[in-house]
Amino acid sequence: MRDESFGFLSALVAAPSPSGYEQPAQRLFRSYIEPYATVETDVMGSVYGTIRGAGEDCPRVMLVGHSDEIGLQVKYVDDKGFIWFGAIGGVDPHLTPGLRVNIHGRTGVIPGVIGRKPIHLLESKDRETVVKLDAQYIDIGASDRKEVENLVRVGDPVTFATELQRLQGDRVTARGFDDKAGSFIVAEVLRQVSALSKPLNVDLYGVSSVQEEIGLRGGITSSYNVNPDIGICVEVDFATDQPDVERKHNGDVAVGKGPIIPRGANINPVLFDLLAQTAEEEKIPVQFTGIPRATGTDANVMQISRGGVATALVKVPLRYMHSPVEVLSLADLDNAVRLIVALLAKIHDKKMFIPV
């Protein structure tokens, strides 16, 4: 991965963006794509980068990844200055006790910790019990409610205090790869398409959507706005190459072995075949999974927007999803970009994906 792209990825995952509070990440996305595309933002906060194709009435292709991450939200401050919170998206209560967090308040970032009773004071039965989220609290070191309320308001978003770090080889860890990895790939596709020697035969809309983690909300509205003929959702997927994941659940999927192309009811069969063919011709490593139902991604709502859209998913293998230490391969990101750019060059007719 080129240095400038890695710098953008690092900044994107560091930017706080729990669902409904995506603006810091979206500002970075917008700034990055402005040299390559015509950019606009809708009232929901989704950002669109558009590159027009050659000729009139080109097929409209929408490429979407969501920028929002899971997080927490301040709900209540007690008299002693402890902060009680709720979850934004699917937060695992096993993981949160003992974590460092950042509260994004009106005066800036307020560091804190999620407290946990010392093991010495726990009853034996409590040591094996998961503390519910509504029984956990944040400590910012304040002495009372008044001190907290000078810094923090009810409704302020909270993120886990972790940023991108390199591991061995091309593996990296961070919070929020679900799905800032997708927004990153969308931005990189726009950059590479803008550098092509001649325009594509499609009107390309690269979208960084919002509020996916709480109901695919930005995917619904952005699909309606773009009204695409073809839609490609870029997401992450469960890697099954860690010791405690059953491969029967999601197939044989490994980090570093290429992007994933799913099949199933949510996937247009002609578009799937073209993706698989493109990967073979371009010698891009890919993996395949089956999803025998609607997917929990923006591809689901995009497919059934208006009169229907030919949709596909390109997914990046991810370990430890919805944790502060998600792990992926930089090569998988690069190969996802290569695959999508090569695919776009093969699209020339909006009717070519009608299954017969």
Image (cartoon, grey):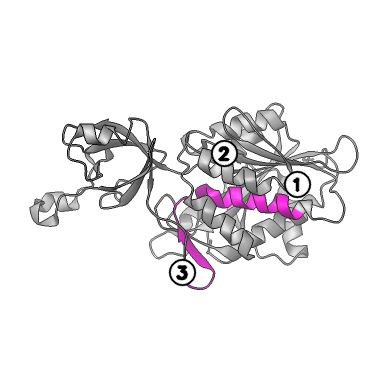
CA separation in Å, label 3 and label 2: 34 Å
Q: How many numbered marks appear?
A: 3
Q: What stretch is highlighted in magenta?
A: 167-192
Name the element at disc 3.
Answer: loop
Is residue 287 visible from the viewing direction of this image? no
Residue picked out by circle 3: 167
Residue 124: percent from left, percent from top: 10, 53
CA separation in Å, label 2 and label 1: 17 Å
Which quadrant is home to the C terminus? top right
The amino acid pointed to by label 1 is Val
Residue picked out by circle 1: 270
Name the element at disc 1.
Answer: helix
Ranked by sequence position, the earlier of labels 3 and 1 is 3
| Residue 231 vs residue 35, the one in the foreground | 35
Ranked by sequence position, the earlier of labels 2 and 1 is 1
Q: Is residue 169 magenta?
A: yes
Which quadrant is home to the N terminus? bottom right
Is residue 11 visible from the viewing direction of this image? yes
Name the element at disc 2.
Answer: loop
Q: In this view, does 109 lie above or below 192?
A: above
Q: Main secondary structure of the magenta part?
A: helix
